[in-house]
Image: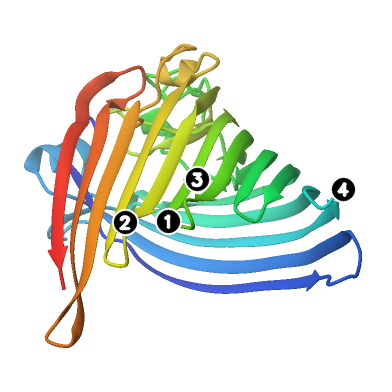
């Protein structure tokens, strides 16, 4: 708050029920199916006292909880629930002995409810009731080709999502002093919640077993389009964070992993990846533009491992070395802030 430190202690209890029922076929012939139902019911209660630890913070905020030590600023209690139902299914059809086509879909429906009470001591308390619900459908199509038992080539389109959520109610007298519905110091509208975010993935890949099962290779190239990115926006003048959907992004690249068994005792593993991850439309909430690279996303990564198995005193034993490289990346969007990564790490183990 105004650049002054606050401390939080959060205690909570949760109760959750998850149920899933699947029906999977074992039919004679080229057609197989899978049908499923999914249900979850989560109840969560939390208590969150917020403290100020400096004289400057205490003087700036006043003292609604007189006599407390350390100085108590707010007591926030919340009671949240999530209910989700979904049904899903897949159909697989053997076009020939080598070609198989699979199509699938998942339909979801969820509802979140939240009751949040903010107690300000002698300044009174407020209770906010929030409700957020959404429905959606994800699809999948996969075509695979298996020329022999040691080789598989596939092409796949698939979609995925993560649930949205309810925003914690902000202190409007601190965070929206001109009552324009915008978080002060930002371009972000103050919203009661944010929608789910989704990804569309196109992937081409292969899985190979070669050299009398000594060599295994898995490789894929992909492009993922990510929409309605969930981002957190905050400022020094507001003690709370507002989460919104902002912009879209694309991740594209390739991955490869391989294992080679020299003999019964010695095994080598080698892998690597390249990824180009950037915004595909402007995100004014983040002061970011299309083409800006997303944070924490190195261009390159690689790994190398060597393992030797042997017998020592009648006991199965091993010695292993692993080297991993992570390329450079930044902790803020658009390659600003602190740069991290660009290092190699060697691990040795024996047992």
Q: In which quarter of the image is the N terminus?
A: top left
What's the CA distance linking mark 3 and mark 1?
14 Å
- Label 1: element kind: loop
Using the image as rendered, state which of residue 348 and residue 173 is in the foreground: 348
x, y percent for residue 115:
55, 57
For disc 1, the marked residue is: 214
- Label 3: element kind: strand
Q: Is residue 3 visible?
A: no
- Tell me: residue 212, above or below residue 248: below
- Which mark is nearer the camera, 2 or 4? 2
Q: Which of marks 1 and 4 is nearer the N terminus?
A: 4
What's the CA distance linking mark 1 and mark 4?
31 Å
Residue at (85% x, 49% y) in the render:
96
User: Alpha-carbon neighbours of circle 3 within 10 Å: few (<14), some, or many (≥20)?
Assistant: some
- Label 4: element kind: loop
Q: Which of marks 3 and 2 is nearer the N terminus?
A: 3
In this view, the residue farthest toward the left is 55
Using the image as rendered, state which of residue 175 and residue 292 is in the foreground: 292
Residue at (32% x, 27% y) in the render:
235
For disc 4, the marked residue is: 95
Left/right of residue 329 with respect to residue 288 in the rendered view: left
User: Alpha-carbon neighbours of circle 1 within 10 Å: few (<14), some, or many (≥20)?
Assistant: some
Q: Do the residues labelled 2 and 4 touch (CB within 8 Å)?
A: no
Residue at (60% x, 48% y) in the render:
163
Using the image as rendered, state which of residue 327 and residue 241 is in the foreground: 327
């Amino acid at each position: 708050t105004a650049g002054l430190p606050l401390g939080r202690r959060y205690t909570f209890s949760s109760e959750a029920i998850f149920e899933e029922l699947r029906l999977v076929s074992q039919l004679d012939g080229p057609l197989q199916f899978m049908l499923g139902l999914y249900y979850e019911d989560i109840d969560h209660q939390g208590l969150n006292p917020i403290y100020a630890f400096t004289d400057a913070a205490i003087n700036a905020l006043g003292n609604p909880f007189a006599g407390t030590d350390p100085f108590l600023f707010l007591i926030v209690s919340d009671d949240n629930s999530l209910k989700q139902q979904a049904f899903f299914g897949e159909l697989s059809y053997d076009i020939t002995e080598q070609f198989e086509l699979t199509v699938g879909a998942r339909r979801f429906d969820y509802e979140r409810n939240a009751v949040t009470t903010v107690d300000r001591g002698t300044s009174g308390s407020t209770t906010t009731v929030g409700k957020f619900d959404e429905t959606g459908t994800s699809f999948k199509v996969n075509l695979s080709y298996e020329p022999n038992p040691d080789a598989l080539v596939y092409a796949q389109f698939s979609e995925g999502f993560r649930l949205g959520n309810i925003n914690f109610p902000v202190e409007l007298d601190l965070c929206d002093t001109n009552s324009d519905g915008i978080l002060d110091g930002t371009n972000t509208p103050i919203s009661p919640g944010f929608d789910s975010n989704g990804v569309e993935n196109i992937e081409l890949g292969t899985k190979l077993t070669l050299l009398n099962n000594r060599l295994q290779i898995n490789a894929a190239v992909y492009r993922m389009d990510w929409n309605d990115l969930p981002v957190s926006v905050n400022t020094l003048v507001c003690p709370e964070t507002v989460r919104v959907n902002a912009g879209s992004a694309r991740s594209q690249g390739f991955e490869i992993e391989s294992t080679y068994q020299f003999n019964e005792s010695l095994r080598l593993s080698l892998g690597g990846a390249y990824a180009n991850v950037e915004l595909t439309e402007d995100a004014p909430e983040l002061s970011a533009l299309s083409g800006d690279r997303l944070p924490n996303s190195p261009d390159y990564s690689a790994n190398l491992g060597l393992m030797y198995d042997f017998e020592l005193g009648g006991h199965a034993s091993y010695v292993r070395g692993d080297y991993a490289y992570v390329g450079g990346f930044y902790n803020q969007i658009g390659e600003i802030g602190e740069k991290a990564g660009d290092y190699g790490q060697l691990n040795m183990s024996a047992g």
